[in-house]
Image: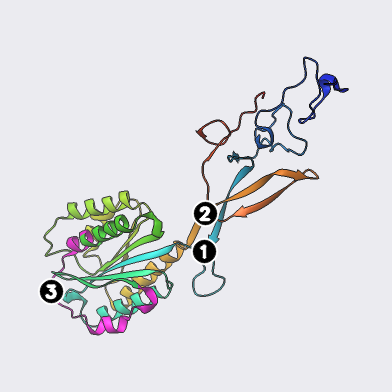
Amino acid sequence: MSICKYGKNCVNFDCKRVHPAGRKPKCKFGAGCSRPGCHFIHPKHHKLPSKDAKSMVMKGGGSYVKKTIVKVQKIGGGERKYRRKIYCTLSLDKSSSMHGSRIGAAFDGIKELLKCLRQKDLVTLRVFSDEQGLAFTGIQAPKVDMKRMSDNTSVGGCTALYDAIIIGAAGIVAHHKKSGARDGFQQVFVLLTDGEDNSSTQSAAAARAALTKLSTEVKSSRVLLLSAGQSGLAKLQEIGSGIRGVSIHEVEASASGIKEAFSFAKKQMAQMMITTTTTVVKKSSTFKGGHSRSRSRSRSRSRSRGPGRGRGRGRGRGQSG
């Protein structure tokens, strides 16, 4: 075999000639090397990533750069982009103090609230007085007939507020465990009452424990506790204050105040339409003219294998081959 005329200064990765001692060794990762500033010899068209790039190496060559983008769902028309599906659980007080215009205002408010939801969003409605009732469960938002619900709902009885919170929270946890993370639902629990508890079988401490469990086991959940008047506000604050994802809001104890409460809930739901996702851009290991060719992938990748390094964070170590 002939001697290479470039001697130890030869940087041709594919050169098969004989070289003297002192020549820089080849990188054992070859075209798959992603270590910024690697000083070993690489194939002719290989380009090392910049030192400030956050790269990951995939098995078989090629590096991946992680980027974060924000996509927004606008409410009330306009451009529609991706957002998570919402599973909204509503719990409505129908005790005797909600008679007349108050219960009508509550159903009108729920109707307006549901307008910000889409075909793939699901709704469950629970009603409570001294007993707990389930009007419907897991219905697509556009198919909910609130007029029919209003006509079929009778008002009366006492207020089992603690029981309503416990049953509502437990239902969300059960749905989350059954469907798992694969369904991608954002869980939302909205409860409205106009009075304090006077007939629950459970305690305020048990209701707080149920909300704490919901916050812990369903980390994406959001809870809105709405009080029409101050009579139930103190207990709601005792139950929900300091728990992650729980908001408490007070309005006037009237029909207009109840409509305002659901208007507030609608604004909170609008904030949940903002979704942060992670997108990966693949950079080919083949380059032309010093510029990489890239294409984006729709699904996220947070971890990958580095060549010859087992399971890791994709930091390929350039070493002599």
For label 1, the crowd category at 10 Å Cα-Cα, with few meaning under 14, some 14 to 19 and many 20 or more, is: some
What residue is disc 2 on?
277
For label 2, the crowd category at 10 Å Cα-Cα, with few meaning under 14, some 14 to 19 and many 20 or more, is: some
Counting the numbered discs, the total is 3
Q: Position of residue 75 (x, y in %)?
A: 49, 71
> Which image quarter: residue 26?
top right
Q: Looking at the image, which is closer to me, 31 or 213?
A: 31
> Which image quarter: residue 192?
bottom left
Quadrant including the C terminus: top right
Q: Nearer the viewer, mark 3 or mark 1?
A: 1
Horizontal side of residue 30 vs 16, given as left or right: left
Q: Are marks 3 and 1 in contact (CB under 8 Å)?
A: no
Residue visible at 75% across and 21% down in the picture? 24
Q: Nearer the viewer, mark 2 or mark 3?
A: 2
- Tell which circle, 1 or 2, labels the residue nearer the N-terminal end: 1
Q: Which mark is residue 157?
A: 3
Which amino acid type corresponds to the residue marked 2 in the rendered image?
Answer: Thr
Q: Looking at the image, which is closer to me, 193 or 28?
A: 28
Residue visible at 16% across and 76% down in the picture? 96
Looking at the rendered structure, the secondary structure element under dot 1 is loop
Which segment did they paint magenta?
140-166
What residue is disc 1 on?
82
Residue visible at 35% across and 56% down in the picture? 221
Horizontal side of residue 133 vs 216, given as left or right: left
> Which image quarter: residue 250?
bottom left
Q: Position of residue 257 (x, y in %)?
A: 32, 74
Which amino acid type corresponds to the residue marked 1 in the rendered image?
Answer: Tyr
